[in-house]
Structures are given as C-alpha cells and as structure tokens.
Amino acid sequence: MLLKARTESDELLTLRSLNIRTDLTTKEKFHYQNLERGYEGELRFDSMIEDLSEERYIINDLLLEVNNSFFQIDTLLISQGIIHPLDIKNFQGDCYLRSDNLYSVTTGREYKNPINQLNRSASLFRQLLQNLHQHFLVDASIIFINPEFTLYQAPLEQPFILPTQINRFLRDLNKGSSQLNDGHRKLAQKLLELHQPKHPFAKLPVYTYEKLKKGTFCKNCKSFRITIKHHHLVCNNCGVQEKIDQAILRNVKEFCLLFPNHKITTQAIYDWCKLDLCKRTYTRALKTNYNTIGSTKNTYYK
C-alpha cells in the first residue's frame, strides 16, 4: 500500500526552472542533471514495486531528523517483521570499486561512496526507531536501477542490488508472508508526521528576479516561442497546445516557488508571464483559483 507518493523536490523544481530562465554554471548544471537522473531512476523503481503482493507499506522520499542530523530515504518498505530502507541510484556505464571508492571506468571520475551514505542513513534510522521504542529488523540496500550500469569488483558482502538482481529481489520479497497490524500502521503514521517537507541543505544558486528571463515557455519542450490562438497557447517549436488559464496557473506556481516572499498580484504575474493578454484575463484566473486579499490597488492573492 502506497502511503506517500513520490514528487519532485523543491530543489529539483527550482533548478529545472532556473535552467530554463538563466545560465547555470557547469557545476550547477551538473548538480541539476544528477537530480533529474536520480528522480527518473526513482520513478522507474516505483513502477517496478507497484504490484508487490502481501501487505506492505511503501513510503517514498522520507526526510527525517534525529539527534540534530538529517537523513533521507528514497524508498521505505515496511513489512511484517522487517523494514527495508532503499537508496536508489541511477548510475550509468561501467564502474568499479577500489578502496571503498566508486570510479567510472571510462572517465576515471570518482563518485561519492554510496555505502557511506547508506550506512549513515541506516544508522540514524535505527536510532530513530529506538527513540520511538520500536523494534524492527532493518535491512538497508542500494538499488542500482539503470539496466546499462555495470559494477566491477563489488565485494559479495556489500548491500548492493545490481540491475540484473532487482527482479530476483522483488520475487524474494513476494515470497515472504507479510501481514501488517495496528503497530505497523502507527509506525508508518509517525514516520509521515516526522517527515520534513523542506531540505535544510538544498544546493541552490543565488538568483534575483531582475536577472531571470521573463515569459511563458512551452510545458513540453520549454521553448519560449509561443503563439496565442483563441483560448490556447500553441508552441511554435513542438506544436503542443495548452489552455491559457492553465498556463497562467503554471506560471503562478513557478513564481511562488522561485520567489516565496513576493506577493501574488495581477501586475506581478502579468510581468512574469509576458503574454499579450489583457490584465483582466490574469485577474480572472487568479480570482478563480486563489483567495483574494485586500481591495482595489492593494489586492493580492494567496
């Protein structure tokens, strides 16, 4: 049973927007692309565990804190007698382990040791369970989800589940009987309550409103080459259409994400979208979907 669906983090959504509206540095773009690949890998794994048999709770994207230390769990599987914290990695290509470090065979690039990250998260999760007076066996693993990934020189004792082993891992899960009770439900609910919605260490570039490109881009290909036709926006690059009201609301959400301290006003959204529309169109969309605060020139929406 899925208790918490996976969504893009604010960090990923912000970087995705900044990648369209400004020039990211090489380092910033590399970080953004890693987040995109990671999210794609997590979605791929989500689709593989949709049909798990027996009773199990699935909680995605848990950000927890214990003893002033934050840790993240990509996927948490709660079964009858065991909990599986899973770290999903979407690495691609050939890699090898040497002295507990992970390297690319082709480029020689060194990656962060996934074992260190997993061991830290598993240790903190066990501490959290102890604080909650819960006694479950915790079996943490790293799932290498990309079918085009190969890992050489991996010790047998490492908690790696390679691409060719994922189906077997899921089959073994299905073979085990799992019947959840009220204790499992209360634990799952407590973990959801403890989830931190904002990551305190998100890596975001410094940006200002003035330096970002204004305008409405295509929801599909991200091109700014947009034409207004009747009640729709039509992308001149890929041909995708979008209702004007939906495009305005998409821009409002992006504006709120990037500038959470700015008030949502008709003028602000008009300047942000830069569509050749009368201001009444923006006001109508805002009034229909947001609460109106104030009156006359001081009106804003929340």
Image (cartoon, rainbow, N blue to C red):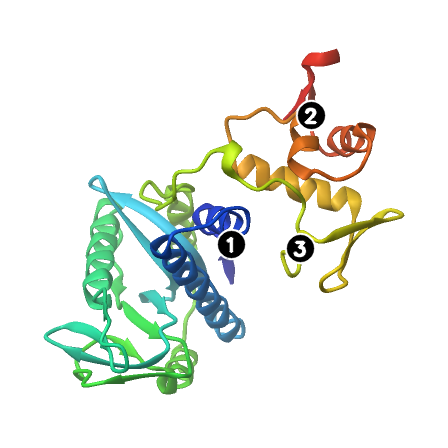
Residue indicated by mark 2: 267
User: Whole-percent x and y of residue 81?
Assistant: 32, 67
User: Whole-percent x and y of residue 55?
Assistant: 47, 68
Query: What residue sits 36% from the left and 57% below the top?
Result: 26
Query: What residue sits 77% from the left and 42% below the top?
Result: 245
Quadrant of residue 294 in the image?
Answer: top right
Neighbours of disc 1 within 10 Å: few (<14), some (14-19), many (20+) = few
Give whichever of discs 2 and 1 has the lower sequence position: 1
For badge 2, the amino acid type reads Gln
Query: Observer-nearest residue: 198 or 201?
Result: 201
Q: Please say whether residue 273 is visible from this viewpoint.
A: yes
Give whichever of discs 3 and 2 has the lower sequence position: 3
Query: Observer-nearest residue: 198 or 240?
Result: 240
Query: In this image, 31 relative to 225: left or right?
Result: left
Outermost right residue: 230
Residue 219: numbered disc: 3
Alpha carbon distance from label 2 to label 1: 30 Å
Residue 61 vs 149, above or below: the answer is above
Residue 69 vs 152, above or below: the answer is above
Alpha carbon distance from label 3 to label 1: 17 Å
Neighbours of disc 2 within 10 Å: few (<14), some (14-19), many (20+) = few
Q: Secondary structure at mark 1?
A: loop
Alpha carbon distance from label 3 to label 2: 22 Å
Q: Secondary structure at mark 2?
A: helix
Residue indicated by mark 1: 7
